[in-house]
Image (cartoon, grey):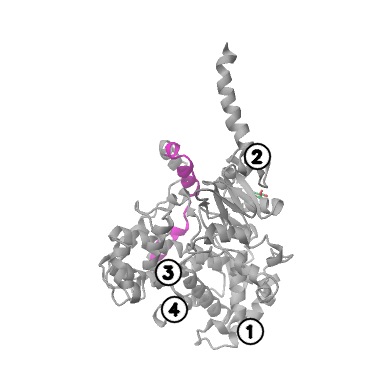
Amino acid sequence: MTLLLLLPIIIFLLHNLIYKPLTSPLSSLPGPLYTKFTSLVLKYHELRANRTRWIHALHVRYGPVVRIAPNEVSFASREGVKEIYCSGGSGFDKSGWYDLFKIYGRRTMFTFLKKDDHAKRKRILADRYANSNVMRQAPLSGIIERADRVVKRCAESLDGSLDLYICLHSYAYDCVTHHLFHPYGTDSLRNKQDEEIMREITFDDSLQNRQLSYYSPTLHKAISKILYICGIKPRETPLADKFILDTAAKTDAAPFTLLDRLHSVRLGNSNGDGEHGGKDSKIAQIDQLDIAAELLDHMVAGIDTTGDALCFLMWELSQPRSRQIQTKLREELLSHPSSDINFDKLPYLDAVVMEGLRCFPAIPMSLPRIVPRGGKTIDGYFLPEGTTASCQAYSMHRIDMEAWGPDPDAFRPERWFEEKGDAARKKLFFAFANGARGCIGKHLALAEMKILLREVYSKFTTVPDKTMTEEDMEMEDQLISTRPAGLKCLLKFEPIGGQ
Ligand SMILES: *[C@@H]1O[C@H](CO)[C@@H](O)[C@H](O)[C@H]1NC(C)=O
């Protein structure tokens, strides 16, 4: 009798837990057996801030296509990136995971899930990030000024060491706020109050809290007080919020800034902005809160990314194994006058930056997308609609033998000059993602990195401080970016030519 009652339940369980996973189209994909049945292992590694490394280990074992959960697949292939991020211009729509990044309840260019919404907003903002706008005198001189302030900090540190982790985050913060708000940019390299805002954004420990709010909103709500007491706090940035809300209200920012652009759109005023101007009023209605949300997004996106990428890169350049690379870089820099800002004449600097971004991409982890209606076949595997598909830069930059050769883990800028694999490398490079939803701040970030490296390495050699360990510089996942586990990076600076 009891058995009869239980039978439907048993059948239901067998069907859902065993039959469905085993017959799902994803069950034929490479990947560990347990990923057919459960996403718990993936979630466990996410909570341990180890998602990127775990997925990479799976790619090393199973190849460029791997199932990481019953409904989720990771790709590390040229076809994967082309289909997921570039098909139809901007690839598949974003997954609900991006809801975690909504600001003031608003969606921004970064958090719109649908490609049309994204395209409309991007049309308004894109020209401020175009290389031709970034490389103009006014925006560039602000970056150079800030790089000089870093050099000053280096020079002051000669008796001891300098914590580059802090210094480079300040630099990135001051540079991005310059580009967004000038003359209302920050000066956190010299001003403690501004540094506080940078610290509030950078020393954030909301990873576990935010993951829980995504996976189980009800549970998250129910135990949020307990979490808080245990130190698992939500993201809170009151100082940055105040700074943004105050600054977003300014209507007299410099013409090259994003703030200027947003206000001219809000006012339906083309402001001499060329061909797109007249269409502004139709392509977007934005209000003051949209402006603030968009600006906070861009500001935050510009700090940890550039800051951490530079930090990992300079750490690597300072290692004894990289001494020749540092020397070669310096020789190139010293053979060109620093008044000449033409980066085309500095190919080795470019290779060093590319190799830095390859080995230590600021956003090494998966950027999840949803397979559209009707499903898609990628790399010969059919993914039903609704499957989460993604690439992660960390693996994109290491897995493909033709592109990266036998030494993908070595920091070797010279690989960027090799003809063999050149096309493959360009297709796989994913430090700024790819397609229309790729990083809009790419040119700004590259300019910041190159200017800083040029200023520092034409004046100093760098070596690690003796108190630093390998563990301090282990990659630690955050919600979207990565950072050195020790949250510090002490280097010693020696002026070139002694004294
Ligand atoms: C992170 O993942 C890698 C690869 O699966 C594993 O070897 C390592 O032990 C993990 N680390 C932690 C802290 O879980």
Count of marks placed on residues = 4
Mark 1 vs 2, N-terminal side: 2
Q: Is residue 370 above or below residue 6?
A: below
Horizontal and vertical percent for residue 28? 66, 44
Among numbered discs 3 and 2, the one appearing first in the sequence: 2
State which tag comes first along the sequence, 3 or 1. 3
* Callout 3–callout 4 Cβ contact below 8 Å: no
Q: Counting other residues with Cα less than 10 Å from the Cα at mark 4, is it few (<14), some (14-19), or many (20 or more)? A: few
Give 104 or 107, whichever is nearer the viewer.
Answer: 107
Report helix, strand or loop for mark 2: helix
Residue at image mark 3 = 176
| Image location of residue 185, percent across then percent down | 37, 71
Q: Which SS class for mark 3?
A: helix
Q: Return the residue at label 4.
A: 132
Which callout, 3 or 2, points to the residue nearer the camera?
2
Q: Is residue 284 left or right of residue 411?
A: left
User: Image quadrant for the C terminus?
Assistant: bottom right
**Residue placed under numbered mark 1 in the picture:** 331
Q: Which residues are magenta?
A: 194-220
Coordinates of residue 411 in the picture (x, y in percent): 67, 68
Mark 4 vs ligand 1: CB below 8 Å: no
Amino acid type of the residue that numbered disc 1 sits on in the rendered structure: Glu
For the residues labelled 3 and 2, say whether their Cβ atoms are less than 8 Å apart: no
Q: Quadrant of the N terminus?
A: top right
Q: Is residue 225 one of those drawn in magenta?
A: no
Residue holding disc 2? 34
Ligand 1 within 8 Å of disc 3? The answer is no
Q: Mark 4 or mark 1, which has the lower sequence index?
A: 4
Q: Is residue 205 magenta?
A: yes
